[in-house]
C-alpha cells in the first residue's frame, strides 16, 4: 500500500505450497493437486522459487517418457497460486490453462523441444494468450554451448485486444580457463502496441534483477546482454550487463548491471549477495537494490 516506495514483492503470509496425489513408474508420472511446474528454462512456465512464496499450480499433469531421449509433458491448470500470498488481491489467477511440451534429445550435442501454452484467464483477460514455439540447445564443443528459441503469440479466448507478436532468443556460452562467459539477445516483440507477455514465467531470472520488465512494455523489449562468472577462493562470482531497447520506435530504455556472490558455509547452508544498478534512459527510474540471503536445507 505504500505506493511512493519501491516494491518488495514478498509480503507476510502463510499458505500451503504443495499438496498432491501422484502416481509414478518408469515411463509415466501423473500428478493431481497443488504442484510445482517448471518447463524448459522457466521462460514461460516456472515457480519463481527466488521469492519467499513460490508460485505453484492447481491442476493435473501427465509426463510420459517412452524412452531416455523422448518426453511428453501436458498440464491442465485451473488456478495459479502467485507469489503475493493469500492476503493480496493479486493472490490467484483462475482460468483454463493448458501447458503442452514435447522434448527430444537427438544426440548428446543437440536437444529440441516444441511447446504450446494456452491461457484463458477468468479475470485477467488481457493476459489470455496462445503461445507456440520451439527451443533448441546444444554443444558446439566441450567449452561452447548455445540456446536458440522462437515463439509466436496471439490473443486468445476473451482477450479484448488483437495482436500477433514474436519471441526470439539466441545465447552463446563458453569457458576460457576457469572463467565462464555468455552473450545473448532476447526479443519480446510488439504488435498493435501490445508486448509479448510471459505472466507465468520465473520473471526474476530474465531481463535483470531490478525487475523493471516483468510486464513487457507495449513497444516490446530487446535485451542485449553480456556476462562473466568465476570463482575467487570459495566464493562464486558473476556479473551481467544489459542493454535494454524497445522493439518498436527505437526507444532506449536503459542499462543494468547485475552482480552476485555466493558462498557455501557448509554442504547444507549457503549465503548469497546480490546487487543491481539500473540506469534509466527512457523507461522507469534509476534503481539500486541489494539482497542478502541465507539458505539452509534440512
Image (cartoon, helix red, strand yellow):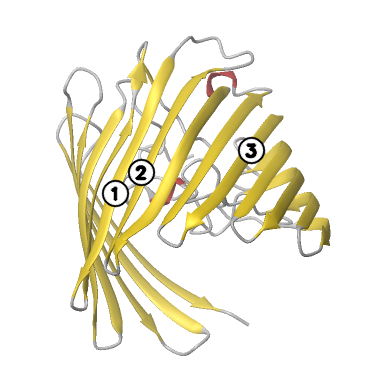
For the residues labelled 1 and 3, the Cα–Cα distance comes to 24 Å
Q: Position of residue 67 (x, y in %)?
A: 67, 58
Tag of residue 100: 3
Q: Please determine whether, in this image, residue 216 is positioned above or below residue 44.
A: above
Q: Residue at x 31, y 49 (%)?
A: 208
Tag of residue 171: 1
Q: Please determine whether, in this image, residue 150 is positioned above or below residue 207.
A: above
Q: Residue at x 41, y 26 (%)?
A: 196
Q: Nearer the viewer, residue 25 or 128?
A: 25
For disc 2, the marked residue is 148
Q: Position of residue 93 (x, y in %)?
A: 65, 34
Q: Nearer the viewer, residue 136 or 157?
A: 136
Marks 1/2 in contact by CB < 8 Å: the verdict is: yes
| Nearer-N-terminus badge (3/2) | 3
From this viewpoint, is residue 238 visible? yes
Q: Please tell me in which quadrant of the rendered image residue 149 appears.
A: top left
Quadrant location of the C terminus? bottom right
Amino acid at each position: 500500500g505504500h505506493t511512493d516506495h519501491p516494491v518488495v514483492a514478498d509480503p507476510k503470509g502463510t499458505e500451503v505450497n504443495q499438496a498432491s496425489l501422484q502416481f509414478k513408474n518408469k515411463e509415466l508420472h501423473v500428478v493431481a493437486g497443488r504442484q510445482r511446474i517448471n518447463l524448459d528454462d522457466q521462460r514461460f512456465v516456472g515457480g519463481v522459487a527466488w521469492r519467499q512464496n513460490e508460485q505453484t499450480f492447481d491442476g493435473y499433469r501427465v509426463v510420459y517418457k517412452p524412452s531416455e531421449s523422448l518426453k511428453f509433458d501436458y498440464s491442465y491448470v485451473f488456478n495459479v497460486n502467485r507469489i503475493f500470498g493469500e492476503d493480496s488481491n493479486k493472490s490467484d489467477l483462475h482460468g483454463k490453462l493448458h501447458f503442452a511440451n514435447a522434448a527430444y534429445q537427438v544426440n548428446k550435442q543437440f536437444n529440441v523441444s516444441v511447446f504450446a501454452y494456452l491461457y484463458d484467464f477468468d479475470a485477467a483477460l488481457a493476459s489470455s494468450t496462445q503461445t507456440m514455439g520451439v527451443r533448441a540447445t546444444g554443444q558446439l564443443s566441450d567449452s561452447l554451448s548455445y540456446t536458440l528459441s522462437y515463439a509466436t503469440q496471439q490473443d486468445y479466448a476473451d482477450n479484448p485486444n488483437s495482436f500477433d507478436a514474436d519471441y526470439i532468443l539466441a545465447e552463446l556460452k563458453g569457458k576460457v580457463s576457469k572463467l565462464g562467459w555468455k552473450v545473448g539477445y532476447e526479443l519480446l516483440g510488439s504488435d498493435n502496441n501490445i508486448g509479448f507477455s510471459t505472466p507465468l514465467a520465473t520473471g526474476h531470472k530474465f531481463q535483470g534483477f531490478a525487475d523493471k520488465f516483468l510486464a513487457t512494455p507495449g513497444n516490446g523489449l530487446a535485451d542485449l546482454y553480456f556476462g562473466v562468472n568465476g570463482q575467487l577462493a570459495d566464493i562464486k562470482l558473476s556479473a551481467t550487463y544489459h542493454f535494454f531497447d524497445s522493439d518498436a520506435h527505437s526507444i532506449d530504455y536503459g542499462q543494468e548491471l547485475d552482480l552476485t556472490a555466493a558462498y557455501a558455509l557448509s554442504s547444507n547452508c549457503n549465503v548469497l549477495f546480490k546487487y543491481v544498478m539500473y540506469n534509466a534512459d527512457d523507461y522507469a527510474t534509476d534503481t539500486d537494490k541489494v539482497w542478502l540471503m541465507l539458505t539452509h536445507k534440512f
